[in-house]
């Protein structure tokens, strides 16, 4: 593709160094995605400037005005510590008429708010676990339709924040305790779902109007004890020592029945469009032993590190890492944002 003047926007604490030399694995993991993206774009010949953003858009506005990037590669997943505010940064980019990668503001709003997302998908009759939301300060009264075991998580946070083995509860006392933990320690409302036992599958999607589904990926829980629920806790997702201890991996999902694969493909496309997603996304599912499929979450702007499941899935589809990033860039430049219609 054409070599672009690119502004990569990241969290201010995640601006990566020029080299990995001298850093530990733990340190590198903090900004691995940012390093992989920036170093790959530079190696591909793009003119890359990196900008760290924390709690002000002044520097972002100045960078847009001064360097006039042809594309903003957006890796910012929060603003001032608030995950749901990333949509406002993208809206600001639209106001500045700056093309950007990843999801649009509406898609971020609908998918980041997990309660609103589930309500919308229920309207579209897309199968998701039964759920209830407990607001901070609200009494924990469990609806009759919810029966243990139940899964307690944040209604807004992502990256498995607040999710541990204790998140799966099998009685009301433990439920109240975990909801209180979510309210007080995580500082968010609690989303309580029926716990779906089965295979955990991830479906990567690329596109704006025309969509590409990548090979289905699976979280393999290895030798995790049967006494523990097989869920993607924070340790399962991010603790390398824990992953090595229990042989926890992600890889291509094999031996999927054709009917299940067809359903995953159909549901992923419906979910992507129902939530007005754009650019790329990863949609998480659980599949029971009887073949029934349940959508868990939609993740706009998935982790783009070279060795994470989204890039590995693309590679399995014959799309090397550099090509994946440039495909995302092309989608960002071609997204039909309103100001383009106004200019026309």
Image (cartoon, rainbow, N blue to C red):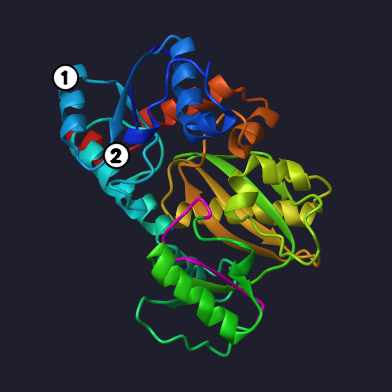
Residue 59: percent from left, percent from top: 18, 30
Relative horizontal placement of residue 138, taking residue 249 as reference (left or right): left
Foreground residue among 324 and 221: 221
Is 149 contained in the magenta span? yes
| Above-or-below relation of 319 to 143 | above
Is 35 contained in the magenta span? no
| Above-or-below relation of 67 to 295 | above
Residue 151: percent from left, percent from top: 59, 71
Name the mark on residue 160. Answer: none
Foreground residue among 187 and 60: 187
Residue 241: percent from left, percent from top: 68, 41
| Above-or-below relation of 229 to 96 | below
Mark 2 residue element: loop
Q: Which residues are magenta?
A: 148-160
**Of helix, strand and loop, which mostly describes the magenta segment?**
loop
**Marks 2,1: beta carbons within 8 A:** no
Quarter the C terminus occupies:
top left
Q: Which residue matches tag 1? A: 66
Name the mark on residue 337. Answer: 2
Residue 47: in sight, yes or no? yes
Distance between the alpha carbons at the discs numbered 2 and 1: 22 Å
Answer with mark 2 or mark 1, whichever residue precedes in sequence: 1
| Quarter of image, res 264 | bottom right
Mark 1 residue element: helix
Relative horizontal placement of residue 105, taking residue 250 as reference (left or right): left
| Quarter of image, res 251 | top right
């Amino acid at each position: 593709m054409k070599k672009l003047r690119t502004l990569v926007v990241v969290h201010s604490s995640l601006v990566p160094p020029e080299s990995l030399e001298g850093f530990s694995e733990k340190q590198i993991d903090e900004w691995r995605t940012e390093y992989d993206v920036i170093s790959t774009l530079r190696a591909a010949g793009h003119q890359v400037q990196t900008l760290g953003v924390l709690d002000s858009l002044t520097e972002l506005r100045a960078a847009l005005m001064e360097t006039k990037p042809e594309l903003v590669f957006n890796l910012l997943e929060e603003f001032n510590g608030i995950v749901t505010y990333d949509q406002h940064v993208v809206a600001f980019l639209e106001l500045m008429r700056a093309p950007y990668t990843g999801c649009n503001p509406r898609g971020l709003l609908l998918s980041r708010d997990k309660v609103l997302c589930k309500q919308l998908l229920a309207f579209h009759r897309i199968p998701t676990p039964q759920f209830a939301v407990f607001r901070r300060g609200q009494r924990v009264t469990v609806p009759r339709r919810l029966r243990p075991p139940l899964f307690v998580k944040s209604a807004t946070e992502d990256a498995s924040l607040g999710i541990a083995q204790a998140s799966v509860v099998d009685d009301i006392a433990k439920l109240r305790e975990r909801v209180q933990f979510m309210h007080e320690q995580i500082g968010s409302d609690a989303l309580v779902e029926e716990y779906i036992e089965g295979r955990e599958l991830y479906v990567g999607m690329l596109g704006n109007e025309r969509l590409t589904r990548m090979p289905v990926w699976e979280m393999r829980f290895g030798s995790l004890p049967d006494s523990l629920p097989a869920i993607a806790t924070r340790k399962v997702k991010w603790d390398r020592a824990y992953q090595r201890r229990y042989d926890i991996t992600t890889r291509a999902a094999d031996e999927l029945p054709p009917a299940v694969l067809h359903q995953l493909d159909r549901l992923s496309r419906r979910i992507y469009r129902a939530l007005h997603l754009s650019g790329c996304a990863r949609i998480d599912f659980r599949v029971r032993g009887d073949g029934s499929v349940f959508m868990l979450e939609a993740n706009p702007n998935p982790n783009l590190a070279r060795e994470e499941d989204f890039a590995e899935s693309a590679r399995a589809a014959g799309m090397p890492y550099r090509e994946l990033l440039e495909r995302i860039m092309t989608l960002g430049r071609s997204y039909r944002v309103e100001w383009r219609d106004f200019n026309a």
